[in-house]
Image: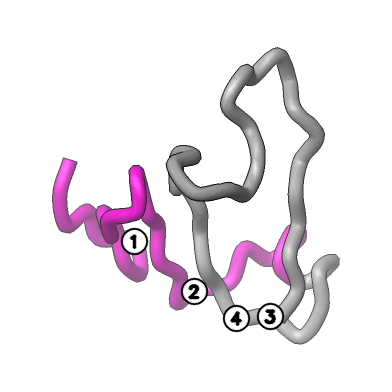
Amino acid sequence: MARLEAPPARISDYGLRIGAKADFVTLRAEHVPEAVVSVPKPRSVYKTGKLVARDGIVLRR
């Protein structure tokens, strides 16, 4: 599993820690360039730790 972290862009509560916002995307790729260039499906999108979309279908807003 590869993990990418963007540097903070004036975000005061940025980082991986208990209590931080949990907005992230999971996807399957052989390497990071593949994940960035091809944006593979299937993928899941989480907002505040809750699944909100899977494989291009919005489950909740």
Dot 3 corresponds to which residue?
29
Does dot 1 land on a helix, a strand or a loop? loop
Q: Which mark is residue 24?
A: none
Q: In which quarter of the image is residue 37?
A: bottom right
Examine the structure image and report whether residue 44 is included in the region drawn in magenta. yes
| Amino acid type, callout 1 | Gly
Dot 4 corresponds to which residue?
28
Dot 1 corresponds to which residue?
56
Q: Which residue is drawn at 49% across and 74% down?
A: 41
State if disc 3 and disc 4 touch (CB < 8 Å): yes
State if disc 4 and disc 1 touch (CB < 8 Å): no
Tell me if mark 2 has few (under 14), some (14-19) or many (20+) residues whose alpha carbon lies within 10 angstroms of its own.
Answer: some
Q: Where is residue 6 in the image (x, y as percent from the top left)?
A: 76, 40
Looking at the image, tell me whether mark 1 or mark 3 is earlier in sequence order. Answer: 3
Q: Gap in Å between the C-alphas at discs 1 and 4?
A: 14 Å
Looking at the image, tell me whether mark 3 or mark 2 is earlier in sequence order. Answer: 3
Tell me if mark 1 has few (under 14), some (14-19) or many (20+) residues whose alpha carbon lies within 10 angstroms of its own.
Answer: few
Q: Gap in Å between the C-alphas at discs 3 and 2?
A: 9 Å
Q: Gap in Å between the C-alphas at discs 1 and 3?
A: 17 Å
Instruction: From the image, state whether disc 2 or disc 4 is nearer to you.
Output: 4
Q: Give the range drawn in magenta.
A: 35-61
State if disc 3 and disc 1 touch (CB < 8 Å): no
Q: In which quarter of the image is residue 39?
A: bottom right
Q: Gap in Å between the C-alphas at discs 2 and 4?
A: 8 Å
Q: Where is residue 17 in the image (x, y as percent from the top left)?
A: 58, 48
Examine the structure image and report whether residue 30 is included in the region drawn in magenta. no
